[in-house]
Amino acid sequence: MKVTIIGSGYVGLVTGACLSDLGFKVVCLDKDEEKIRRLQAGDVPIYEPGLKELLTRNCAEGRILFTSDVCEAIEHGDVLFIAVGTPPSEDGSADLGHVVDVASMIGRHLNDFKLVVNKSTVPVGTADLVRAAIAHELSQRDLPYELFDVVSNPEFLKEGAAIDDFMRPDRIVIGVDEGVNKAKSNRMMGDLYASFNRHHSRTVWMDVRSAELTKYAANAMLATRISFMNEIANLADELGADVEYIRRGIGADSRIGHSFLYAGCGYGGSCFPKDTRALMSTARAHGKVMRLVSAAEQVNGDQKLLLVNRLVQRIGSDLTGKKLAIWGLSFKPNTDDMREATSRVVIRDLLTRGAHVSAYDPVAGAEAILALRTDCQDQPELLDRFEVVSEDMQALKGADALMVLTEWKVFHNPDFQLMKKMMRCPFILDGRNLYNPETLSELGIAYQGVGRRNDLVQLLTFNDSHDSFPVTPASITQELDLSVDA
């Protein structure tokens, strides 16, 4: 069985690379000829750990190739994966233009039976649109409707761990509808994923509409868990509680579990924001309101500015002349993806308030510059006060505060003494709760996490010269007779 992947973006490349590594002959099709030239030359246009190595090996062994030739690609595959983008429209709904265009293209070039697999994240009813588009083109060519089938096989890939997610899936969702080709479609999809079901079945079979909704439901639930924990963390700040203890306490309940209970400065990326909005849009189109999902989205929007608001509480809203350091630009570690990244909201706000921003990220620096150019199109002069530097400590030179926005491992255990020397004012706003408040207190570094007993630093004030704190965090701890272990 041969496979064609239509769309060589994040999902398409990971799917193609992994299937080729399982021994399938794979062709990746994309209309972007420059991208195809780069891929053919061994240049992978996205950062994903292990992807370049996987593609290089399978290209060398002849199991995967890249083309912009539609006829070649459609002719090659027995299974045709649709893995093109579904960007959000202005109302939040998923733009299915690329998906429908691909379906029409398939219909124009299809000559024998093909199994069409929707891999893109799409709203309920998309498979019907794909069927209709292909059937229309076949009717124009006097070819039978039975020459194809459409199934749903949503992806569940976490950026930064996508290869492992694909090769060691916890479940494979496949939606197949009743019809003359159902048995054949079931067999083909079963053969495609047979390697993952040898020891125990990971495949969850269902109808197409249920499969389409499953992807949105999963992402909406995870987004809701994150926003819920962020609300708990914000309340913990007011009450003098520590969300890290709370996380462990509720995570020990087997009904809840430990995953996605980390408080922080908001979620981003290409999935959670887009998919929650698309789900709400789908509900509205059917006269329903997703109240819980809507609340999760609103909480997340507010959370992205949490660190800025806390900084403003300390030193005022006018940040003219202040230098702020940022560690972490991508929406999560192990990716250069800047889509919906918290850093974009934070940096734009800081620049608007007059600050100079110096930022460091292990891989996303170039992508961040492009993203900020887009965000500041209306005020391009703001970027005169923004720089991306090549080393983490370089960003701290003369900084009045550091904001940690992405939990890259390289940030987990920094040289705090050196940080203190580099910064004009040793103050860390930790948006990912990487550091121990008590440790930093003992070092004389002011610290504020998310839900980390921030009552210890709320008494801090800044003097006019900004050279030092009148009250050190350590002295506050002694005065209040409080500790993290109390």
Image (spheres, helix red, strand yellow):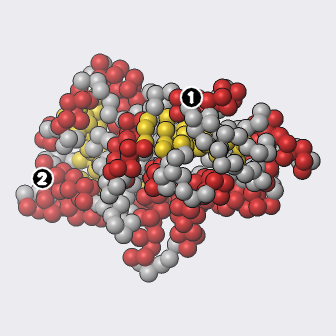
Foreground tag (1 vs 2)? 1
Residue 63, picture quadrant: top left
Residue 18 at x, y = what percent?
40, 32
Residue 199, compared with residue 446, is above or below; it is above
Residue at x 49%, y 31% (from the top left corner): 362
Under mark 1, the amino acid is Met
Q: In this view, does 333 lie above or below 253?
A: above
Q: Which residue is drawn at 32% across and 34% down?
A: 45
Dividing the picture into quadrants, the one containing residue 194 is top left
Label 1 close to label 2 by CB (< 8 Å): no
Q: Which of 421 and 166 is in front in this view?
A: 421
Which label is found at residue 393? Answer: 1
- Amino acid at pointer 2: Arg
Element marked by disc 2: helix
Can residue 75 be seen here?
no
In the image, 314: left or right of 385?
right
Name the element at disc 1: helix
Q: Distance between the residues labelled 1 and 2?
A: 56 Å
Is 344 located above or below residue 238 in the figure?
above
Instruction: Say whether residue 301 is left or right of residue 66.
Output: right
Q: Earlier in the sequence, mark 1 or mark 2?
A: 2
Q: Which residue is drawn at 57% across and 69% down?
A: 295
User: Who is closer to the viewer here, 358 or 470?
Assistant: 470
Say which residue label 2 marks.
Answer: 108
